[in-house]
């Protein structure tokens, strides 16, 4: 079976590896020069050398908010990092590159290649791509398509009254790279997801004042730097100021929108049978993977609130087993028994979601339960020690036991 894989990030590489193990023929299309997807750090913002929007949102000081023990592919552990769990972005990127080399994936990847159109024909898929270096188009045909290009590349910025009148700096977290650009400024951070909190802490090291706009009461109780002040949602902007919902006003130099991303799949033509609702939901997908209208198209990695590497790998194994066990003539019949999901958000439903992939008629090896236990324990640990949890080390003792090593006294001094 010939399989087109869109993107050479974590999801695409996991797909290529498992395709080869199943004797499928993968061809991976990657618009950039290297593997890694969102883990690639690019100092530039805006457009790349091909005139396309920079894909990555990586910033220089990012550290992972999950330990490496939850950020590895099965049977390919990190090496030489026994005494550290939370990593710098470049350590993850280095790991991804080693994974790619180890499994011989590079020869299956076409770099600097942009997918411009995917269309469903009677018996197969037509994929049109552009060689970005030569500006030439070519068309290939496949038995299946795996969409793995991610959902953290198209920024969503809320439409706040007066935004266009504000004369200071305005960027989305997608374009945030280093805090030094905000030295001695009064900076407004909008949004309190993982990036919002992390960028708030990063910017507060150099800014004069940081105004942190969110609606999470539990954050107010946390200990931030003295120059961080919590505010409710923004009401409107003026030329030099921001007005909040509580009717207070502050003078501003810059705004950083940590407000998430829109899902965009412009290369999927109507014949694919896929829609994106409200820029947030790909539909109709069975188990967040299978295109119900055309089951030989799968989506890998369109999940929120999960541990990425192993869960994406589980999705891949489930989908390839689905393709392998159900010959092409049976897929349309199988689709009649599928139900579409209504969210890509997992959160507390992560375990039940993963169990649904292994309890289905499609039998695949489960993710060992210890990883879910580590995930929950690290989540609770991060809430309690949100400014110093990066110093903790996770030790997996055996298949059933682990410990979190953490110096509480040192944490109090941070």
Image (spheres, helix red, strand yellow):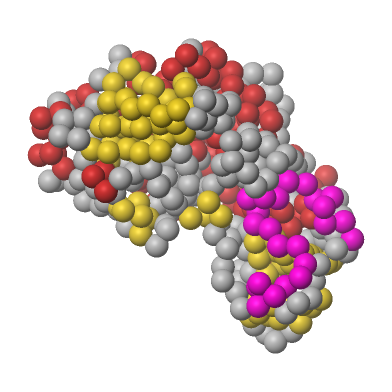
Point out residue 270 in the picture as x, y percentages from the top left corner: 27, 48
Given residues 80 and 309, the one toward you in this image is 309
Q: Can residue 106 be seen in this view?
A: yes
Q: Which residue is drawn at 46% across and 34% down?
A: 114
* Residues in magenta, as a range: 162-184
Point out residue 106 in the picture as x, y percentages from the top left corner: 50, 17
The question of residue 182 being in magenta is answered with yes
Point out residue 46 in the picture as x, y percentages from the top left corner: 65, 47
Given residues 399 and 69, the one toward you in this image is 69
Given residues 52 and 281, the one toward you in this image is 52
Q: Quadrant of residue 38?
A: top right
| Left/right of residue 38 with respect to residue 121 in the rendered view | right
Q: Quadrant of the N terminus?
A: top left
Q: Is residue 71 above or below residue 65?
A: above
Q: Can residue 300 be seen in this view?
A: no
Q: Which residue is drawn at 33% across and 17% down?
A: 25
The question of residue 185 being in magenta is answered with no
């Amino acid at each position: 079976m010939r399989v087109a894989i869109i993107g050479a990030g974590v999801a695409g590489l996991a797909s290529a590896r498992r395709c080869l193990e199943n004797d499928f023929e993968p061809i991976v299309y990657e618009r950039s020069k290297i593997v890694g997807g969102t883990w690639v750090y690019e100092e530039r913002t805006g457009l790349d050398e091909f005139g396309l929007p920079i894909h990555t949102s990586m910033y220089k000081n990012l550290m992972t908010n999950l330990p490496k023990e939850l950020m590895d592919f099965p049977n390919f552990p990190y090496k030489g990092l026994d005494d550290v769990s939370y990593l710098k972005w470049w350590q993850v990127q280095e790991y991804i590159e080693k994974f790619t080399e180890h499994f011989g994936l590079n020869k299956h990847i076409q770099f600097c290649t942009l997918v411009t159109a995917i269309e469903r024909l009677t018996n197969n898929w037509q994929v049109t791509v552009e060689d970005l270096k030569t500006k030439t188009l070519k068309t290939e045909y496949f038995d299946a398509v795996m969409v793995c290009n991610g959902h953290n590349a198209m920024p969503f910025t809320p439409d706040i009254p007066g935004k266009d009148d504000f004369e200071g700096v305005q960027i989305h977290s997608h374009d945030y790279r280093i805090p030094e650009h905000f030295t001695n400024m009064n900076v407004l951070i909008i949004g309190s997801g993982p990036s919002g909190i992390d960028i708030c802490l990063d910017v507060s090291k150099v800014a004069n004042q940081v105004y942190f706009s969110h609606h999470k009461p539990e954050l107010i109780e946390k200990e931030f730097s003295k120059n961080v002040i919590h505010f409710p949602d923004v009401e409107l902007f003026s030329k030099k100021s921001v007005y909040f919902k509580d009717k207070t006003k502050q003078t501003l130099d810059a705004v950083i929108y940590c407000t998430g991303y829109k899902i965009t799949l412009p290369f999927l033509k109507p014949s694919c049978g896929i829609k994106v609702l409200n820029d947030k939901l790909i539909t109709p997908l069975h188990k967040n993977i299978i295109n119900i209208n055309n089951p030989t198209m799968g989506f890998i990695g369109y999940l929120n609130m999960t541990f990425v590497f192993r869960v994406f790998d589980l999705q891949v194994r489930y989908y390839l087993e689905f393709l392998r066990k159900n010959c092409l003539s049976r897929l349309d019949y199988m689709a009649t028994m599928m139900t579409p999901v209504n969210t890509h958000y997992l959160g507390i439903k992560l375990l039940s979601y993963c169990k649904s992939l292994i309890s289905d008629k499609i039998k695949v090896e489960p993710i060992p339960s210890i990883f879910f236990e580590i995930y929950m324990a690290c989540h609770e640990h991060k809430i309690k020690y949100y400014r110093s949890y990066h110093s903790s080390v996770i030790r997996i003792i055996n298949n059933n036991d682990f410990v979190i090593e953490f110096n509480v006294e040192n944490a109090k001094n941070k």
